[in-house]
Amino acid sequence: MHNHASQYLISAWRGEFLDAATERLFRAHSEPHMARALRRAVLVWALLVVLFGALDYPALGWTAEFQLLFGWRLATGLLLVFFYFQVRRKPALATSGYAATAVEIFGSFLFFLLYFLRHDMVTWVIGVVAVSLLALFMYIPNRVYLSLLAAGFIIAGMLFCVAINGFGIETLVGLTFMLMLPTVVGFFTAMRWQVAQRQNYALLMQVMSANRDLQSEVRRREALEVELKRQATTDPLTGLFNRRQYEMLFQRERERCNRLHQQMSLCIMDLDHFKRINDEHGHDAGDAVLRHVAQRLSCSLRHSDVVGRFGGEEFVLVLPDTGLEQAMAVLDRLRAELAVTPVPVNGQLLPVSATFGVTEVQEGDAELEDVLKRADRALYEGKGAGRNRVMTA
Ligand SMILES: Nc1nc2c(ncn2[C@@H]2O[C@H](COP(=O)(O)OP(=O)(O)OP(=O)(O)O)[C@@H](O)[C@H]2O)c(=O)[nH]1
């Protein structure tokens, strides 16, 4: 969705958003609230139409005039109840405004009828019309120009009734002024309300959009942080821990094993005749083999084991809570697995094997370097003894 300030410009004339799509969204947004308010207004209106009928009987008695008026009140009341249920079924009727306007115009005929049939209270009728005009704008939710249309119809109708009753131009002008007053007050109040609603909506949407932008920025930065951390701690080719990270993890595991009086082993693993793979199949094939072997190591070892790339075709394996014998068993299983499973590269299966130099971490080992040196010595012996084996030191 585009989200520019221009999208939320409000027409000074119509009091609605200039952008049709925004106006549609606003109406959909305010529909439940508007429909509820309209239903309430319609019910109150229906109640008043019928209740005021009680005043007709003492004045008119059981006459044809009373019956006509009563019938008309009943019809208007029933129309309003019908409209109430229509709005409940289809709340969009409240925001489009046309149906409410049609009901308002139909409802106004009761005033005209009253004017002719209740000679005893003509001035009252005009007073009620004036109040109703105000209510039309302020109590019945509608689009302000449609309310103005209904109000214009009511004023014209009233003037017509008064004119055919024989009143002169002075009365008509006076009545026009009198009915214009609530109309103008109602119009400007409703207009201000209509604009304020849209301004609130625009503000809400802008805040929500800013929030969404902020959230997506936070997510982007979180992902960036994870990625930066990954880059800082892993080897780009294999995804295994880099030297800095496995050194740190080695220290952490060593302290933990010391605390728990557990043994711990460390192994350097070196692929056999790796140079040949590079020479015969190219450097890319060599890279593919390294990635494949790294994945095998990660999958085969325990989650708590630390697998790092030592450099070139050498790997470091830190095995916490593992004594030398146990480590030898684990590594020999790994060695055998590697030796019998060739690596698929570019449609070819390349046999690989590796030599392992393993040692147990001793209390006297001051640094990781001491342990690595011992493991490297064992590895060197393994290479000398014909490769594809696990040697201890
Ligand atoms: N493709 C690839 N090759 C690498 C990488 N790092 C080191 N190498 C190569 O690995 C080979 C290691 O060769 P050597 O040290 O002679 O060891 P080797 O051929 O495995 O022989 P032994 O270890 O004695 O069995 C060299 O050719 C390096 O260029 C890498 O990241 N990618």
Image (cartoon, rainbow, N blue to C red):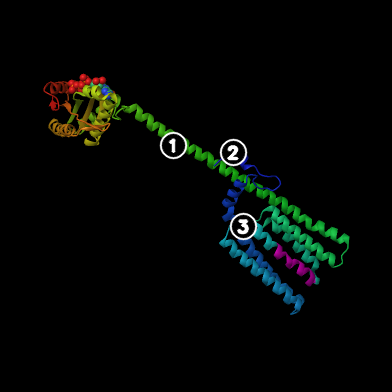
Residue 178 vertical position relative to residue 82 in the rendered view, above or below: above
Q: Classify the position of ligand 1 by quadrant: top left, top right, bottom left or bottom right.
A: top left
Q: Are marks 3 and 1 in contact (CB under 8 Å)?
A: no
Image disc number at residue 4:
2
Residue 251 appears in the figure: no
Residue 9 vertical position relative to residue 323 in the rendered view, above or below: below
Q: Is mark 1 within 8 Å of ligand 1?
A: no
The residue shown at (67%, 71%) is 75
Image disc number at residue 7:
none
Q: Position of residue 358 (x, y in %)?
A: 16, 27
**Which sits earlier in the primary sequence, circle 3 or circle 1?**
3
Q: Position of residue 40 (x, y in %)?
A: 61, 61
Q: Position of residue 37 (x, y in %)?
A: 61, 58
The residue under label 1 is which amino acid type? Arg
Secondary structure beneath dot 3 equals: helix
Q: Which residue is mark 1?
A: 219
Q: CA distance from mark 2 to mark 1?
A: 23 Å
**Which sits earlier in the primary sequence, circle 3 or circle 2?**
2
**Which sits earlier in the primary sequence, circle 2 or circle 1?**
2
